[in-house]
Image (spheres, grey):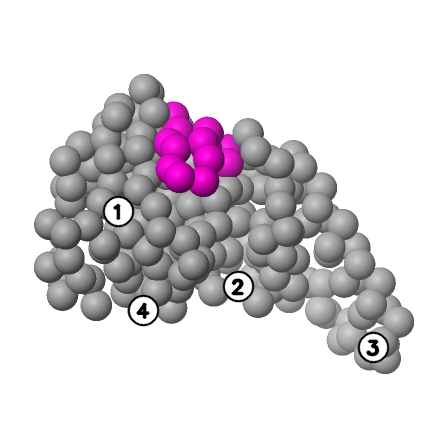
């Protein structure tokens, strides 16, 4: 597992501040569930945020039944989540368990009835959409067979990748399970899956821009 860098720390600070879009926040929540170092950093950011609020915000009296109302809302949320999970199709449950997904991602799939439907898009590769189209950023799970090569591409916006199983390498390094990789518009690369294949979740701000000669026509469909 690679160590966190400046880009990762900025992303974690944005998560702690609550300013990330839903898809990015889900990816980061999944990341901190499997990375003790990331969890410690987020707790540190939250503690600093709490201290800033104490120093800069004027205390406001709360209603006497505030705690009771919050607990009731939590109870209703838990009941709704249980009902949703009970309605989840058994095929979706098998899909989730097949890949031993981290708890935050698993909970999201149960809650939002996301089906595990894989769609091939390159030799040895398939994608499964995780977030709905109304999200600002798109999130998908990508599966690569051992040795599979992605289409060489650059980015129109930021791409965040969290490796869940296996690993891959590109022109900039090698990444294994638990690694968080952030690529921007200045990076052109061709990920290649390792000997165990690769399973990852990805969030992109905008469609990829393919640079290989045989794949430039795909850019017409990726807008």
Q: Earlier in the sequence, mark 4 or mark 3?
A: 3
Taking the image as drawn, is residue 92 in sight? no
**Left/right of residue 3 with respect to residue 137 in the rendered view:** right
Residue 23 vs 141, above or below: the answer is: below
Callout 1: helix, strand or loop?
loop
Can you identify the residue that label 2 sits on?
Answer: 20
Which numbered tag is attached to residue 57?
3
In-front residue for pair 178/159 = 159
Cα separation, mark 1 vs mark 3, equals 49 Å
Callout 4: helix, strand or loop?
loop
Q: Are marks 1 and 4 in contact (CB under 8 Å)?
A: no
Q: Is residue 143 magenta?
A: no
Can you identify the residue that label 1 sits on?
Answer: 152
Cα separation, mark 2 vs mark 1, equals 28 Å
In magenta, the rendered stretch is: 166-179
Residue 6 percent location from the top left of the image: 64, 51
Q: Quadrant of the N terminus?
A: top right
Q: Nearer the viewer, mark 1 or mark 4?
A: 1
Q: Is residue 168 magenta?
A: yes
Q: Earlier in the sequence, mark 2 or mark 1?
A: 2
Q: Label 1 crowding class (10 Å Cα cut-off): few <14, some 14-19, many 20+?
A: some
Please, what is the dominant secondary structure of the magenta stretch?
Answer: strand
Q: Earlier in the sequence, mark 2 or mark 4?
A: 2
Q: Earlier in the sequence, mark 2 or mark 3?
A: 2
| Residue drawn at point x = 19 percent, y = 50 percent | 212
Q: Quadrant of residue 165?
A: top left
Residue 119 percent location from the top left of the image: 15, 44
Can you identify the residue that label 4 sits on?
Answer: 134
| Residue drawn at point x = 50 percent, y = 42 percent | 180
Residue 156 percent location from the top left of the image: 35, 64
Cα separation, mark 2 vs mark 4, equals 15 Å
Q: Label 2 crowding class (10 Å Cα cut-off): few <14, some 14-19, many 20+?
A: some
């Amino acid at each position: 597992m690679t160590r966190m860098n400046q880009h990762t720390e900025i992303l974690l600070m944005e998560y702690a501040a609550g300013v990330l879009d839903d898809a990015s926040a889900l990816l980061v929540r999944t990341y901190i569930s499997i990375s003790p170092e990331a969890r410690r950093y987020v707790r540190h950011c939250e503690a600093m945020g709490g201290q800033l609020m104490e120093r800069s915000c004027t205390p406001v009296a709360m209603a006497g039944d505030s705690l009771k109302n919050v607990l009731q809302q939590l109870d209703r949320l838990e009941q709704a989540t249980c009902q949703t999970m009970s309605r989840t199709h058994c095929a979706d449950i098998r899909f989730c368990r097949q890949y031993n997904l981290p708890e935050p991602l698993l909970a999201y799939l149960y809650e939002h009835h996301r089906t595990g439907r894989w769609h091939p898009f390159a030799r040895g590769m398939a994608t499964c959409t995780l977030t709905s189209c109304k999200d600002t950023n798109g999130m998908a799970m990508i599966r690569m067979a051992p040795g599979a090569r992605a289409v060489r591409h650059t980015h129109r916006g930021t791409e965040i990748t969290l490796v869940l199983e296996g690993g891959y390498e590109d022109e900039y390094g090698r990444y294994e399970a638990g690694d968080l990789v952030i690529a921007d518009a200045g990076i052109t690369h061709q990920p290649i899956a390792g000997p165990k294949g690769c399973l990852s979740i990805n969030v992109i701000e905008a469609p990829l821009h393919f640079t290989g000669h045989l794949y430039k026509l795909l850019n017409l469909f990726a807008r």
